[in-house]
Image (spheres, helix red, strand yellow):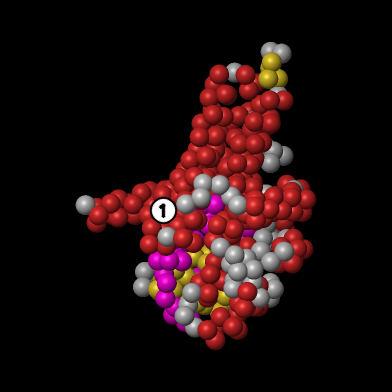
């Protein structure tokens, strides 16, 4: 197991950070939130960079890279709070890649890779799902159910949430084709959303450190006050703990899939806690301005709340881990 990124991975992360810093500043996030949570122009640029197809095999037009690379992009996607359907589309592509149907792969993966088909994904039962990530724009929706995956054609009904920077939907009694690989996709979905939470948390930490370094009271930066410094240190601890867990799970997805269920549950628990704690603390250390509409930290806080619940919140993950440990005793 490598404990650092290779040259290609570092380049991917650097490029993702630069592209999204240029194309998805908070001004763009605000515009997208007001307009429905999807920036079509930004999405076209990400498609041109082959982000939806980064794990799609080369024979289907994709880049043929691994899950670690996709998680690096997801982290930067969260750092920018990018208003795109990347995560849902990438996970639907992942489901189709491993569905065991070569004809379906040949038909759908090239169209997903070029942005022609958008994807939505959620967890539910009997064709119903309370929260479908990227659902309202989806041409294909995958519902992760206990006994397999359900592939549904068409979008889900739009759902209003606390996070207007991305579109969410709801399905009720939908029908579709049955696919295998439910647990595998659930574990990868947990890991990918956890990676985005790491990016969200890192951005909240960066904004907070910048603010408390510049804001002065009694002639000194507020970051020099012990209570503020301790809060920022706790934020850093939460971010780094989550990041370590996430990339251990991402590595497992590529190199040791038999260990992924445990690693994914741990990563999602750590990242969900970090997302909530760090973004909440960011609002606190920004003082009175942190609670205002004009402050940018609330976009991070709102997305973190939804991400923390997607595919199970921290308590769900801890119960999953407890069940695994009990079976191993």
In the depicted view, which residue is nearer to us: 274 or 306? 274
Q: Is residue 183 magenta?
A: yes
Residue 43, quarter of picture: bottom right
Q: Residue furthest top?
A: 218
- Compared across the picture, whether 261 is left or right of 2 comes to left
Start and end of the magenta stretch? 166-195
Location of residue 61 in the rendering, given as x and y in whole percent from the top left corner: 66, 75
* Residue 254 % position (x, y): 49, 61
Helix, strand or loop under label 1: helix
Q: Report crowding for label 1: few under 14, some 14 to 19, many 20 or more residues within 10 A (C-alpha).
A: many
Q: Which residue is mark 1?
A: 263
- Residue 238 higher or lower than 8, as above or below: above
Provide residue 63's location: percent of width, then percent of height.
64, 68
Q: Is residue 65 above or below residue 312?
A: below
Residue 117 in view (yes/no):
no
Q: Is residue 297 visible?
A: yes
């Amino acid at each position: 197991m490598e404990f650092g990124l290779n040259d290609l991975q570092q380049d991917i992360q650097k490029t993702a950070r630069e592209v999204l810093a240029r194309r998805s500043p908070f001004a763009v996030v605000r515009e997208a939130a007001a307009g429905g949570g999807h920036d079509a122009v930004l999405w076209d640029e990400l498609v041109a960079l082959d982000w939806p197809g980064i794990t799609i095999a080369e024979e289907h037009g994709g880049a043929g890279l691994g899950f670690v690379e996709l998680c690096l992009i997801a982290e930067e996607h969260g750092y920018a709070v990018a208003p795109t359907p990347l995560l849902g589309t990438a996970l639907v592509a992942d489901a189709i890649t491993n569905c065991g149907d070569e004809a379906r792969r040949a038909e759908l993966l090239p169209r997903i890779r070029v942005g022609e088909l958008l994807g939505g994904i959620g967890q539910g039962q009997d064709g119903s799902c309370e929260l479908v990530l990227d659902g309202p724009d989806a041409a294909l929706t995958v519902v992760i159910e206990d006994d397999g995956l359900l592939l549904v054609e068409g979008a889900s009904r739009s759902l209003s949430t606390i996070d207007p920077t991305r579109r969410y939907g709801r399905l009720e009694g939908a029908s579709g084709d049955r696919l295998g690989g439910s647990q595998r996709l659930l574990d990868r979905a947990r890991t990918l959303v956890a990676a985005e939470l790491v990016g969200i948390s890192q951005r909240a930490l960066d904004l907070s450190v910048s603010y408390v370094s510049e804001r002065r009271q009694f002639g000194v930066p507020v970051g020099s006050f012990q209570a503020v410094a301790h809060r920022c240190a706790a934020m850093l601890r939460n971010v780094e703990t989550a990041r370590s867990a996430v990339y251990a799970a991402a590595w497992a997805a590529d190199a040791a899939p038999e260990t992924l269920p445990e690693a994914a549950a741990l990563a999602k628990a750590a990242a969900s806690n970090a997302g909530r704690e760090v973004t909440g603390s960011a609002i606190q250390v920004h003082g009175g301005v942190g609670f205002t509409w004009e402050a940018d930290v609330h976009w991070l806080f709102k997305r973190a709340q939804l991400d923390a619940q997607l595919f199970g919140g921290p308590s769900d993950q801890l119960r999953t881990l407890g069940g695994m440990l009990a079976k191993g005793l």
